[in-house]
Amino acid sequence: MPRAVDGTRRKNRRKKILKQAKGYWGSRSKLFRTAKDAIAKAHAYAYRDRKRRKRDFRSLWIARISAAVRNEGMTYSHFIHGLQKSGIEINRKVLSNLAIEDAAAFKALVDKTKEALGE
């Protein structure tokens, strides 16, 4: 009786891993064992960085808003506090976009916050 070998399942599993590793450098795209390790690491980084991206963008928006507000003679924290006091609910992404694309509208917001703070 011939010996049973885990042929197609094994080949398909390995082919799937090597297909995912396509484009990796050197043996990471050619050899199963190193490709498997590289794929595991890549998936871990991808998962981590999907969470990280949200943090990175928020800090970018805050830096942009802070720079725009300083041009108006105010600090970021005072500006956000003034927005809360005046009841304006705009997220940081939109504020950042306003600061870049529509300086007049952003200045109007700064004036409203100064008014709410009593400056």
Image (cartoon, grey):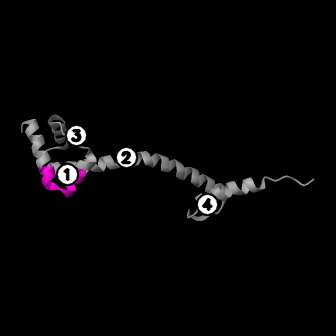
> What residue sits right under mark 3 in the picture?
89
Mark 1 or mark 4, earlier in chain: 4
> What residue sits right under mark 1 in the picture?
67
- Which numbered disc, 3 or 4, marks the residue closer to the eye? 3
Mark 2 or mark 4, earlier in chain: 4
**Residue at the image point whose x is 12% and y is 41% from the top:** 113
- Which numbered disc, 3 or 2, marks the residue closer to the eye? 3
- Which numbered disc, 3 or 1, marks the residue closer to the eye? 3
Depth order, front residue of 59/99: 99
Residue 106 lies in the magenta stretch? yes
Q: CA distance from mark 3 to mark 1?
A: 20 Å
The amino acid at mark 1 is: Ala
In x, y percent, where is residue 45? 49, 50
**Residue at the image point whose x is 15% and y is 55% from the top:** 103
Q: CA distance from mark 3 to mark 4?
A: 47 Å
Residue 110 lies in the magenta stretch? no
> What residue sits right under mark 4 in the picture?
19
